[in-house]
Image (spheres, grey):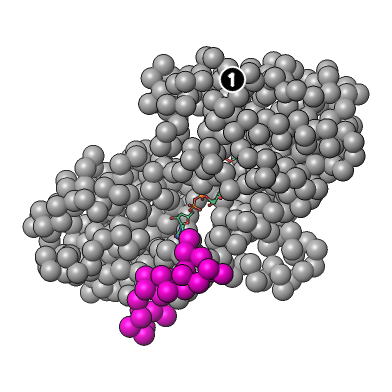
């Protein structure tokens, strides 16, 4: 089977970049990305590709090349489903906020809606690909909906989880460590797997394309995120011990990372991991383990989240304690709000929780982030429902550059590791601040010695 038409449901952080790269690398395949969110589709179709809704280095150039040629963004979901041979489901799977599994399980209502819509519309056999991150055995539920509500056509369900990280999405998609495709071991299943392998083989070495059964593929995605997040919680746990003992966590990370069995990546101590997935996926894993009665397994992984929450709290407490146990009416400037550099995504960013704690202590928060707007920052805080939107509005201000944001501040807190922060004239910033001037480097990106020589009271993580 040769694939010539693909549809992707969900034009978000995964659907948009992934499909843009498939379209760029496979000019013979028509790729249509659909979404219910009209504004998002309008933004993807903005004539100036610098205004597309997701900031990722290199993405706007790829969209400029493929859009209108074989890449399309549309709200006509049914039409796109009808025309495609392969339908990727790339909708959000957030943590449930209601009912059974509230606060832990993945909310699959958007997935189910997609399955029902595909079943309703499809008049010919289709391959349905799970691109979203899903609990193990979700393919079973999707298949049941498709087979029981469809028009008698055949569906093959594949699991093809995405491993891209935000901020490096384009390079991750162009040069993936591996592509994982899970499917049925029947002849029809194998044919579907092979059709999808052929799509990726347009730019990925065949040795890097791994095929497994569906359940292994679904569970591998949750496992990968759990292992990555676990490394961060592990080094963050050590950062607290470093602070008590005179060890330096950067030195410890370097020393252990040179062991080839451990490796150097994902050992950067920080104010805590953020992002839309690590927490959600581990909570989901914990929920799945509990639902099978595997309480020790569940407790083991839950500790990764407990440590991460502790690290965020520890950072805000350190700021309060260092500022003589009160931050009331003090101006604290946040450099960075995004959950990591090179993205405009703020979902679950540590900055949100640190700001919330400090506002509870009546601090005034000022933020500068090169890619995040004030509206987004206020929405993030309002979403916590700790206080009214009016109170958040009165407490938080933003500036279009760091120098203005830091003027008259009592303290600066670095929450995101944006490269530009390392290039600033820190003497100038110091001169414009209240004295003593405090700097809390939640990412360990600045030169502590240089800052201390200027006069800053510097606090990093784990030293
Ligand atoms: P997102 O919220 O950015 O995008 C999801 C999009 O789906 C939204 O635009 C929403 O409007 C749309 N949508 C929801 N239901 C729909 C429906 N029935 N019809 C049409 N459109 C619909 O989410 P995301 O960050 O792209 O994540 C999507 C999935 O990919 C999640 O399961 C996530 O865990 C996984 N994932 C995310 C990343 C990442 O870096 N963000 C990486 C790997 C995997
Ligand atoms: C992560 C995974 O890296 C991707 O492989 C996965 O596809 C994705 O989740 C997903 O499923 O959504 P992402 O969350 O975009 O990607 O970004 P990461 O680079 O993993 O960073 C996550 C958080 O951990 C960020 O807040 C980052 O600053 C923090 N981090 C990362 C550290 O604190 N220390 C590190 O050493 C690395």
Is 259 on the left or on the right of 435, as rendered? right
Pick the front one: 237 or 395: 237
**Where does residue 308 sit, x and y in percent of width and height?**
50, 65
In magenta segment, residue 36: no
In the image, residue 185 above or below residue 433: above
Whether residue 444 can be seen here: yes
Q: Which residues are magenta?
A: 241-265
Q: Determine the secondary structure under disc 1.
A: loop
**Quadrant in the picture for residue 298:** bottom right
**Where does residue 348 sit, x and y in percent of width and height?**
48, 52
Local crowd at mark 1 within 10 Å, few (<14), some, or many (≥20)?
A: some
Whether residue 235 can be seen here: no
In the image, residue 308 above or below residue 162: below
**Where does residue 269 sit, x and y in percent of width and height?**
41, 66
Instruction: Please name the residue that numbered disc 1 is placed on.
Output: 27
Q: Residue at x 38, y 60 (%)?
A: 354
Residue lying farthest bottom?
245
């Amino acid at each position: 089977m040769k694939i010539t038409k693909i549809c992707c449901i969900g034009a978000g952080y995964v659907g948009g970049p992934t499909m843009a790269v498939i379209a760029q690398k496979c000019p013979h395949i028509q790729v249509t990305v659909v979404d219910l969110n009209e504004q998002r589709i309008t933004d993807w179709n903005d004539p100036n590709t610098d205004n597309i809704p997701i900031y990722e280095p290199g993405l706007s150039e790829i969209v400029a090349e493929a859009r209108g040629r074989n890449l399309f963004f549309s709200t006509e979901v049914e039409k796109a489903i009808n025309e495609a041979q392969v339908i990727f489901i790339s909708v959000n799977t957030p943590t449930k906020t209601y009912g059974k599994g509230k606060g832990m399980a993945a909310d699959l209502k958007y997935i189910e809606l997609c399955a029902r819509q595909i079943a309703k519309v499809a008049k010919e056999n289709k391959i349905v690909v799970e691109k979203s991150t899903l609990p193990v055995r979700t393919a079973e539920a999707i298949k049941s909906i498709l087979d029981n509500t469809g028009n008698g056509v055949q569906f093959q369900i594949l699991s093809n989880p995405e491993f891209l990280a935000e901020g490096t999405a384009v390079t991750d998609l162009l040069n993936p460590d591996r592509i994982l495709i899970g499917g049925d071991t029947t002849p029809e299943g194998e044919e579907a797997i092979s059709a999808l392998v052929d799509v990726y083989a347009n730019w990925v070495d065949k040795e890097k394309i791994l095929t497994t059964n569906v359940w292994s593929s679904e569970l591998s995605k949750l496992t990968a995120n759990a292992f990555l997040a676990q490394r961060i919680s592990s080094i963050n746990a050590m950062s607290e011990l470093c602070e008590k003992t005179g060890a330096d966590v950067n030195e410890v990370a370097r020393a252990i990372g040179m062991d080839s069995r451990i490796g150097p990546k994902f050992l950067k101590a920080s104010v805590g991991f953020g992002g839309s997935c690590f927490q959600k996926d581990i909570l989901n894993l914990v929920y799945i383990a509990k639902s099978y009665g595997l309480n020790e397994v569940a407790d083991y992984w839950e500790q990764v989240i407990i440590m991460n929450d502790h690290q965020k709290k520890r950072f805000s407490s350190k700021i309060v304690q260092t500022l003589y146990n009160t931050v009331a009416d003090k101006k604290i400037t946040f450099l960075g709000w995004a959950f990591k550099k090179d993205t405009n995504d703020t979902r679950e960013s540590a900055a949100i929780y640190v700001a919330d704690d400090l506002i509870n202590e009546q601090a005034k928060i000022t933020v500068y982030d090169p890619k995040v707007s004030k509206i987004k920052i206020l929405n993030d805080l309002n979403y916590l429902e700790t206080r009214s939107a009016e109170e958040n509005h009165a407490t938080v201000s933003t500036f279009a550059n760091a120098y203005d944001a830091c003027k008259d501040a009592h303290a600066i807190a670095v929450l995101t590791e944006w490269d530009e922060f390392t290039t600033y004239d820190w003497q100038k910033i110091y001169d414009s601040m209240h004295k003593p001037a405090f700097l809390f480097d939640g990412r360990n990106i600045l030169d502590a010695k240089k800052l201390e020589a200027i006069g800053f009271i510097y606090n990093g993580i784990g030293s």
